[in-house]
Amino acid sequence: MSTFFGRLLAVSPLRASARCLTLAALAFLSLGFLAPQAHAVVVRGVVTDPLGRPVPGARIQLIQAQKAVAIGFAGADGSYEIQSTQSGRFVLLTSSATFLPGIGQDFYGGSTDQVTQNVVLETSSLKEEVTVTATGVPSPVEQSSSAVTLIPQSYTEWATGIADALRQSPGVQVVQQGQAGGVTSLFVRGGNSDANKVLIDGVTAEDVGGRFDFGTVAATGVTGLEIYRGPDSVLYGSDAASSTIAFSTPRGSDLKPVFTYTGSGGNFHSYQNEASISGAHQRVDYLAGYSRFDTSNALPGNEYHSGTAVANLGYNLTANTPLRFTIRNADSASGAPGAHDFFGISAAAKQSDQDLYSGLTIQNTFEGNWHNLARYGIARKREQFKTF
């Protein structure tokens, strides 16, 4: 054979096969280098109003480091899809002519991830109100017919505890024994104080039998409160015979570390100090905080102090599968003066408590909603009463 392939095959069948494989490999590699890279994070979802109706024509921007890296528009059915060749942490900014702008929760997207982010545009609020206790999955409050009250973080960020925020909710009675540090019980719609299901970062927090003291829960590291008024035993068991109270620890979202400190003081030698640090970088987000509250109260021997430490650490295995660890530890002690008003003498006694809640959760998003793949939680309580 006079051709090149003819000379190649004339050498020997074995050597000819080896040379053909080499040429094929070189051609494949050259095509791979010349072909454009198809790596991109794809974000898709549906834009709706609070009642679940689609919002066609809504403008969706994919924001990274305060810059729009991708822009798209919702179709007639409210669906959209945008993509970016960059990976990292993103925020969705959605706008429409008849709605207020919607700022989504930040998320991580890898170069080959496909992320589902459904958007609900509000007409009277910049923040979407979502309930979990009513249906078990995040749902807009407007789409739920249940009696649910959401208390935003702005109601508790300047408070020492959560009792006052709960007291202002409809159908709720908060009973506190004595002053700061006294046992605080919750009665919802006439139910007993031991008929409330209490969840902290998804971990069951009440004692065996349903008892829970809300007076020792500081407002530090509480992103908001959710109160489901009424029986909710279908989702949470017989403990939720009267209500379900859920609150969670916030997570970091700023690309640079943010350090905050607040301090306050008042009568009865009361003062409070609180500090926290939070942030996010690529796959990781973090928040850690500590606060301490001290007061002498009005009676001698009735001093109270409480120290609370919180942490929330998250790591995205993929854009749709985050791993999250939370911990909350509260140490408190209060004096027990007894019947001081009868004899004018306070008893030399002290009640101390330690409450530790910890949880490890692996979640996955499906159709824009988070579902728990695995959850492991620990709730430990220690009480001690001393008489001197």
Image (tube, grey):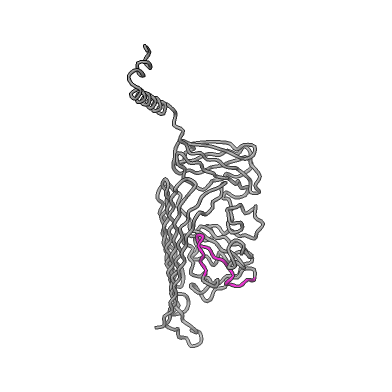
- Toward the viewer: 387 or 313? 313
Query: Which image quarter is the C terminus in?
Result: bottom left
Q: Can see residue 67?
A: yes
Front in this rendered view, residue 11 or 293: 11
Left-right relation of 324 to 60: left
Looking at this view, name the residue that lies furthest to the top.
2
Q: Is residue 162 above or below residue 38?
A: below
Residue bounds of the magenta highlight: 190-206
The residue lying toward the viewer, choosing from 161 and 250, is 250
Quarter of the picture containing the N terminus is top left
**Position of 326 relative to 369 (above/below):** below
Q: Position of residue 257 (x, y in %)?
A: 40, 50
Return the x and y of residue 192 as percentages of the image width and height: 61, 73
| Residue in the foreground of this view, choosing between 203 and 119 | 203
Q: Is residue 230 magenta?
A: no
Can see residue 303?
no
As displayed, is residue 149 above or below residue 5?
below
Residue 97, position in %: x, y? 62, 40
Left or right, residue 66 beside residue 95: left
| Residue lying furthest bottom | 343
Q: Residue 355 location, x and y as percent?
A: 45, 68
Count of picture labels: 0
Q: Tell me which corner region of the image, top left, top right, bottom left or bottom right, holds residue 76.
A: top right
